[in-house]
Image (cartoon, helix red, strand yellow):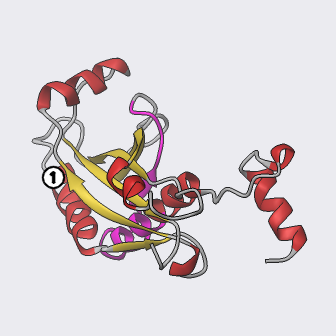
Amino acid sequence: MGDRAAAKQRREVGCESRGLTVPPSIASASKALRLLLDRELTKSMPGLKVTMTPLDKAREGGTGRQVNAYLFDIHEDAGRRNASLGSVSAPPLALTLHYIVTAYGDDEEGSAGTDSHVVLEAVLSVLKSAPRLILGQSASDGFATVSLSRMPIEDLCRLWTVFQTPYRLSVICEVSIFHGEGE
């Protein structure tokens, strides 16, 4: 990477003033997840929209089939961090991102609403079949693994309540970030 590109990358992640080089992991993982969902779902559902907005804003100005993947929690994976404690250099930041993924169908008004179930089933299929997301030009730039997670219904309802939005059937997706092929 050239000096200009490295400087641009540091500016993009807000680290230039401190001289730090930090890969834009969270943004890269979110972008890769959105591109995966968009690419795979629109193959079988043309016109489907993929968004990454807060729960209360997801349906603003839109109707039709939609998938919204909202990043609601980030935590450091202590197990992966501790695995590299014996190394001389500082361990990379091992992050796990939690997204709430909600599907909306064409038949939202005045029907049984089963189209959103069809969309959600397609989302589950895509997420289960995507073992890795590449976060740069290649896996050596970083990658993320994708898995489904369970959240108790009470916690899901609380999450929806925070946004003052009625609960909708949703799934939780975990994205664990790795900083290169060697990790």
Spot occupied by residue 157 in the image (x, y as percentages of width and height): 20, 25
Report whether residue 105 is seen: no
Report whether residue 111 is seen: yes
Q: Is residue 107 above or below residue 180?
A: above
Between 34 and 119, which is closer to the camera in this rendering? Answer: 34
Between 44 and 148, which is closer to the camera in this rendering? Answer: 148
Q: Is residue 125 above or below residue 69?
A: below
- Examine the image and state in which quarter residue 4 appears: bottom right
- Residue reaching furthest left? 112
Between 2 and 158, which is closer to the camera in this rendering? Answer: 2
**In the image, residue 138 lies in the stretch drawn in magenta:** no
Q: Which SS class for mark 1?
A: helix
Residue at image coords 57%, 53%: 27
Q: Is residue 165 above or below residue 168?
A: above
Spot occupied by residue 106 in the image (x, y as percentages of width and height): 28, 50
- Boundaries of the magenta span: 35-55
Residue at image coords 13%, 40%: 111
Image-based side of 32 in relation to 65, left or right = right
Badge 1 amino acid? His
Residue at image coords 41%, 63%: 47
**Label 1: which residue?**
117
Between 51 and 59, which is closer to the camera in this rendering? Answer: 51
Spot occupied by residue 136 in the image (x, y as percentages of width and height): 59, 73
Spot occupied by residue 113 in the image (x, y as percentages of width and height): 15, 43
